[in-house]
Amino acid sequence: MAQAKKQALWLKPLAFGVLLAVLGHLLTIGLIPSVIMTIAMTRIGEASGGLNRLAHGNMVTPQNQQIVRSSPDLAYSTCALDLSKGPVRVFIGKGADYTSAAFYAGNTDNVFTLNDRKIGPEGARIMVVSARSPIAARPGEVVVSLPSDKGLLLVRRHAPSPEAFKRVQAERTQDYCRAVMDGV
Amino acid sequence: MWRWLICGVLGLGLGVGSALAVSGGLFSDAKLVSGRWSTDPTVGAAAANPWLRATIARVGLLALTKEETVYFNRDVDEDGAKLVEGCIYALEGEALPTRWWSITIYGANQMLPINTDGASSIDATRALVAPATTWAGTLSATRPTTPGPWLSSKGGGTFSLTIRLYNPQSVEKAALQALKLPRVKKISCTQTPTSGGGN
């Protein structure tokens, strides 16, 4: 009798523990992408000298790698996007080899990717807007709509050798990522 | 009161801990297998479930969708044993129905192994010099004397490989499963690799 009473005293706390375990699991899983994305955006923004600025990375080596699972065969350029004050304009020049511009929402979703097969010889002009931004794209501009005000642009260019990387460095000098109010 | 406190703390710890453990595994619930390589086609897509999204955020942030790039991973050799720095492996591959591919080595921390060998990856342009349609290389901690591309495992400990397939001709499940992805055959070891199960 005393044993059963003792067991009953644990039932509700145990149920409470199980509930917290489930909530803790779901909350952590749900928060991981946005927390890691925020950290990545902060680091990229700092490396670029601010938001809405394109930073060109060096050739990836074990010594200078910044993020997990980067590829040494690619030349990366990054731009931390902040659309809270309006749209952002992006220009990506046509490369001689594989090039892609991938746009990520704050929850890590790859919402849009443009690769060199769809980039004409004059390059790609892109206007990035958030769901609540006014759209004032120019003729010929590709409009990319992010579900949130924050996001990331990651440009990949094929550069598996120092020679290829040198070529890419010349190709990407005209690339930019700027807030529309910067007058671009 | 102390019963509630103990159960609450333990429950919360278990929930957070299990979330971190689940999201730290590399495609532990991969849906598509080709040989010893595996992938999840929903990587990068809005359709990805919260667990996969959390995993990608931790071990492969900023992945592309399958139409742009398919990522296959493996951490075992052809016999199912874990890939380890102490073993020498033969790599065998052939032309793939994709615009371009590259294989990269990552340590257990998902970073490139720290070494100065300049051999953290092999890509199609270096492995498959026209008119060749097959290639053979080496995966080892020391530079091989045999010709062919080399992937250095120096500093890798227990490591994994990722092959990126850029603009694959087809992203249909059957087509991806039928891909003849590179084989990784153990030649010799100075340490005994543990069994890795089926990756």
Image: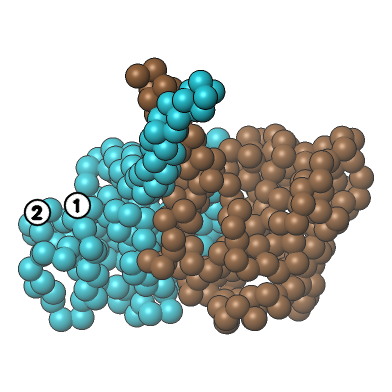
Horizontal side of residue A80 vs B161, given as left or right: left
Write the residue at 49% across / 50% down. Answer: B55
* Disc 2 packing (10 Å; few <14; some 14–19; many ≥20): few
Labelled disc at residue B59: none
Q: CA distance from mark 1 to mark 2?
A: 7 Å
Quadrant in the picture for the C terminus of chain B: bottom right
Write the residue at 7% across / 57% down. Answer: A181
Asked which quadrant contains residue A147, the reply is bottom left
| Amino acid tagged 1 | Asp
Work out whether residue B46 or residue B2 is closer to the camera in this orientation and state it: B2
Quadrant in the picture for the N terminus of chain B: top left
The image position of residue B145, as x and y in percent, is 88, 48
Horizontal side of residue B196 vs B60, given as left or right: right
Rendered cyan, the chain in question is A
Write the residue at 42% across / 37% down. Answer: A15
Name the residue at the top extreme.
B2
- Subunit of label 1: A
Q: Is residue A8 above or below residue A151?
A: above
Write the residue at 68% across / 75% down. Answer: B177
Mark 1–mark 2 CB contact (< 8 Å) = yes
The image position of residue B39, as x and y in percent, is 60, 63
Q: Is residue A140 above or below residue A134?
A: below
| Callout 1 secondary element | strand
Rendered brown, the chain in question is B
Name the residue at the front extreme.
A1
The image position of residue B76, as x and y in percent, is 76, 52
Residue under pointer 2: A85
* Disc 1 packing (10 Å; few <14; some 14–19; many ≥20): many
